[in-house]
Image (tube, rainbow, N blue to C red):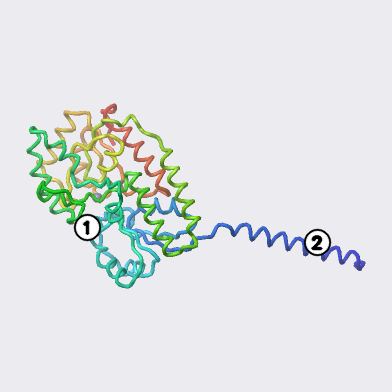
Amino acid sequence: MNLSPNLLKKTLCLILLLWVIQLTAFASTQVTPGPTLSVLVSINPLQLAIREAFSDHVESSLLLPPNASPHHFALRPRDIKALRSADLVVWVGPELEQFLRKPIQQRITSGAASFAALDWLRTQQTNNLLYVNQLRRQHDHHPNKQKNNHQHQHGHQHEHQRSTSSGNEPNGDETRTGIIDPHYWLNKELMISVIQGIKQQLIRIQPELEASLQQSVQEFIIRLSQKNEWKELTDRQFISYHNSFDYLAKAENFSIVEVMTTNTEVRPGAQQLGKIKNLLADKETCLITEPQFSGGVIERVFKQSSLPTIEIDPLGAGFSDYSSYLDHIMQLLSQCGKHINTSRH
Ligand SMILES: [Zn+2]
């Protein structure tokens, strides 16, 4: 088939036009930059928040499998490699991940970036950090409850490291005051603050991302502040396996009246289990168990009975973002306790 010169010219023009349109379309999809910074995160809830707040700019990876307890973890060779190669390492702090103290120190020495959430929160004006058992201790100042103090004191000393930060430690009240409860991540205000701190670090590493990081963090804050209030939880009472829900209780106005243990390396003794069983029987209280620590003892003592129990994972395994993880926990809490006396799980 012979094309006339005129038709050939028109065809060539059309091809050129289509090529230009395609190029323009390709360019417009490139407005949002893809992941540019590699961030290694110690625990799952922190990664959920980082993923939600910085999804377009950060490629995050998780150090601890979500089903592992950060209280007892040993680094594998591939973890050590990942700790060296990431642009930024984010962790809670030595109060929780003792095993990260040395690798983080090595990063600091070599000039690599790291971010400890608790250290950041200590520097903030609105420092809402809690000491281990602080809320129950305030309770315990009631003369009838003085007998609880002895037991708490032991848990603290074994479980958590003394705060290493200078200053900011209240005076008096013996050894207990210096031990920060590391489970800050269920308080969304504190998590927002931590995300702001991580944003500053990311901007320091890659300043050209500043505007987009500001915007995506702003969207994250708006999403969290628009959350339901869960007023039905106000003044409800819970007992938890360990002290992982105190920050959430304070933020949402419910109480954790007792914990089975603050030292997760030791299973609660018969005396403590008996005490908790009595508390559960006497009051409209719900027991929160945790998948990382559920084992024979809990099942035997509590799940066989008709006492209200609910299993909640404070590390949020299986979730893709922080917002839906928080919603899920609040929903579970609101289903257990006061109004339900027969939940067998
Ligand atoms: Zn814990």
Instruction: Residue 337: give x, y in percent of width and height.
Output: 27, 31
Does residue 296 appear to the left or right of 322 in the view shown? left
Given residues 300 and 143, the one toward you in this image is: 143
**Is the CB–ligand 1 distance for label 2 below 8 Å?**
no
Q: Amino acid at mark 1?
A: Ser
Label tally: 2
Dot 1 or dot 2: first in sequence order is: 2
In the picture of the structure, the residue carrying the numbered disc 2 is 14
Q: Quadrant of residue 271?
A: top left
- As rendered, which of 253 and 158 lies closer to the eye? 253
Labels 1, 2: front one: 1
Disc 1 secondary structure class: loop
CB atoms of marks 1 and 2 within 8 Å? no
Q: From the top left corner, tell me how far across and down residue 158 is, in percent.
A: 14, 54
Look at 19% across and 47% down and name the residue there. 132
Disc 1: CA contacts within 10 A as few (<14), some (14-19) or many (>=20): few
- Work out whether 300 lies above or below 335: below
Q: Residue at x 26, y 54 (%)?
A: 69
In the picture as drawn, the residue positioned furthest to the bottom comes out as 110
Kind of residue at badge 2 = Leu
Q: Which mark is residue 165?
A: 1
Q: Secondary structure at mark 2?
A: helix
Horizontal and vertical percent position of residue 62: 37, 59
- Left or right? Give the position of 35 relative to 184: right
Q: Quadrant of the C terminus?
A: top left
Task: In the displayed orientation, state which residue is furthest to the top.
Answer: 339
Rendering coords of residue 125 (x, y %): 30, 48
Question: Within 10 Å of the Cα at label 2, are there few (<14), some (14-19), or many (20+) other Cα atoms?
Answer: few
